[in-house]
Image (cartoon, rainbow, N blue to C red):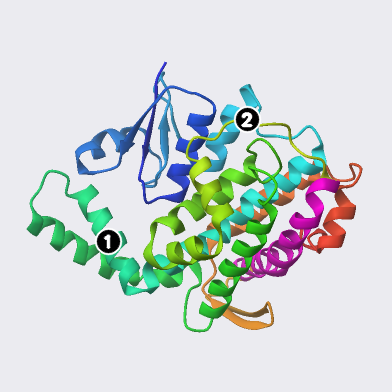
Amino acid sequence: MTYRIFGSELSPYSVKVRSYFRFKDLPHDWIPRSPAVQAEFQKYAKLPLVPLVVTPDGEGIQDSTPIIERFEAAQPSLVPEDPALAFLSALLEEYGDEWGNKWMFHYRWRYQADVWSTAERIARQMMEGQGALAVAQARAAVAERMTGRIGFVGSNPTTEPTIEGSFKHALALIEAHLQTRPYMLGGRPAMADFGLWGQFYELATDPTPGAIMRGAAPKVMAWVQRMLTPKNEGPFEAWPALAPTLMPLLKEEVAGLFLPWSTANAAAIAAGQKSFEMTLGGASWVQEPQKYHARSLAEIRRKYATPKGVPGLDAILTESGCLKFLS
């Protein structure tokens, strides 16, 4: 009963799934995607994206959150019993997956040291077993292709200060939050950890953001290492214990940047716009809309419909400013 995870060490969503399989002690083989396994990958994948999990009975599953939710449905362990905390965890996972990816992609393909570091690692994976010339040619091709795609996540000269400011601010907020606990919601990992961690793990491996993290956030760096093989170290905490350091993240990052951006992005897609402009965090933001993120906003709104009205949740969402984006 061994699962196969087709992924990449450079994909935040791939390492997120691998970390989850390690946490659940699910037997699995980690298969770096390369030309050598492309035929097998295409046999099971509906989309040309990692991660892909192939079950022992030959079913292919893609997209990191649905993969985790599929296994959690059979044997839940990431979801707090308190439905309010369970939703907040899902919301923070969404923030990590969709907004945190902007930090990662921006730094990775904006600065030359990061471009060459990442392109080199991708090229070695692609050209496994081939010579130095093949790797060098692949590295140059990857660097050229990916730097041209940086705008895909909304990174451009106008938005750069907001993206980098958000990364540094979120890093400081999470550093403060992790001072007294090993995981985002207490003594055991939650969905929030996996969504945020995938992005921070990749950022930690790249020269520019990695240096920022090592210099400013030792608790976050320890958490990054801990999440490689996460373990239950205690119970989830109750909201009153989490609130002093988690509410600022919800208020200033999730409600301050992520949800207004996601709402404007979805509106632009619904209107058929080729680009949209808005004021975000007091600064100008302009980009082409991203179709996938409109679906992810609809999904988090769907998830909110179930616990809506449970004790405490709407008060938290109202105080943080999140509620108006979820209805």
- Residue at image point 34% right, 67% down: 114
Query: Which kind of residue does numbered mark 2 sit on?
Result: Asn
**Height in image: 186 above or below 283?**
above
- Residue at image point 78% right, 60% down: 322
Query: Where does label 1 land, which residue?
Result: 119
For residue 151, the mark is none
**Height in image: 144 above or below 161?**
above
| Residue 250 percent location from the top left of the image | 74, 59
| Residue 243 percent location from the top left of the image | 81, 53
Magenta stretch, residue numbers: 240-269
Q: Is residue 243 magenta?
A: yes
| Residue 314 percent location from the top left of the image | 88, 52
Q: Which of 296 and 77 is in front in this view?
A: 77
| Residue 18 percent location from the top left of the image | 45, 36
Disc 2 to disc 1, C-alpha distance: 36 Å
Q: Does the magenta stretch include residue 126?
A: no
Q: Which of 74 and 163 is in front in this view?
A: 163
Q: Which of 12 and 214 is in front in this view?
A: 214
Query: Where does label 2 land, which residue?
Result: 232
Q: Nearer the viewer, residue 84 or 293?
A: 84
- Residue at image point 29% right, 62% down: 117
